[in-house]
Image (cartoon, helix red, strand yellow):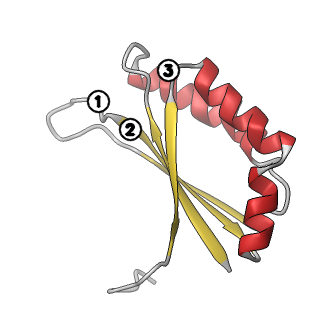
Amino acid sequence: MYKMVIVIYRNPTVPFDEAIRWWTEEHFPIAKKIPKLIGYVVNIAQREEDGKDPEIMGTDEIYFKSREDAESAYRSTEWAESRAHTQAAGHRASRCTVKEVRIIDPS
């Protein structure tokens, strides 16, 4: 399995609640169309104890069977549409491939 994590940075001119609404209601349906995805997990950021809005909206964890599938997906029109949708809203994303290491398994 091949896993990537994408950090979604909120456009600072967009209120946090509106950014989360955009992400969950508008962006998720676009992103889940990326070909060859076998898993898609989202971690939505929460406000801090002091009530401050976080800089990020959260992270995507996306899974593919292989690196080749991930590279093919990255070149797809669907991924390009997802990137364009994020950029048009003024948000930005940073992605990387990760190797998950569980120190304490939550299950």
**Residue bearing the label numbered 2:** 56
**Residue bearing the label numbered 1:** 53
Q: Quadrant of the N terminus?
A: bottom right
Residue in the foreground of this view, choosing between 13 and 73: 73
Residue in the foreground of this view, choosing between 101 and 105: 101
Label 3 CA crowd tier, 10 Å (few <14, some 14–19, many 20+): few
In the rendered image, the residue lying farthest to the top is: 13
In the rendered image, the residue lying farthest to the left is: 50
Quadrant housing residue 17: top left
The residues tagged by marks 2 and 3 sit, at their Cα atoms, a distance apart of 13 Å
**Residue 53 as seen in the image, left or right of residue 11:** left
User: Which comes before the other along the chain, label 2 or label 3?
Assistant: 3
Label 2 CA crowd tier, 10 Å (few <14, some 14–19, many 20+): many
The residues tagged by marks 3 and 1 sit, at their Cα atoms, a distance apart of 12 Å
Label 1 with label 2: CB-CB less than 8 Å: no
Quadrant housing residue 28: top right
**Residue 38: where, in percent of width, then height?**
77, 68
Indicate the secondary structure of the residue bearing disc 3. helix
Q: Is residue 100 above or below residue 22?
A: below
Amino acid type for the residue under numbered disc 1: Asp
Q: Residue at x 40, y 25 (%)?
A: 16
Amino acid type for the residue under numbered disc 3: Glu
Indicate the secondary structure of the residue bearing disc 2. strand
Amino acid type for the residue under numbered disc 2: Ile
**Residue bearing the label numbered 3:** 18
**Residue 30: where, in percent of width, then height?**
77, 37
Q: Is residue 13 above or below residue 97?
A: above
Residue in the foreground of this view, choosing between 28 and 93: 93
**Residue 83 as seen in the image, left or right of residue 21:** right
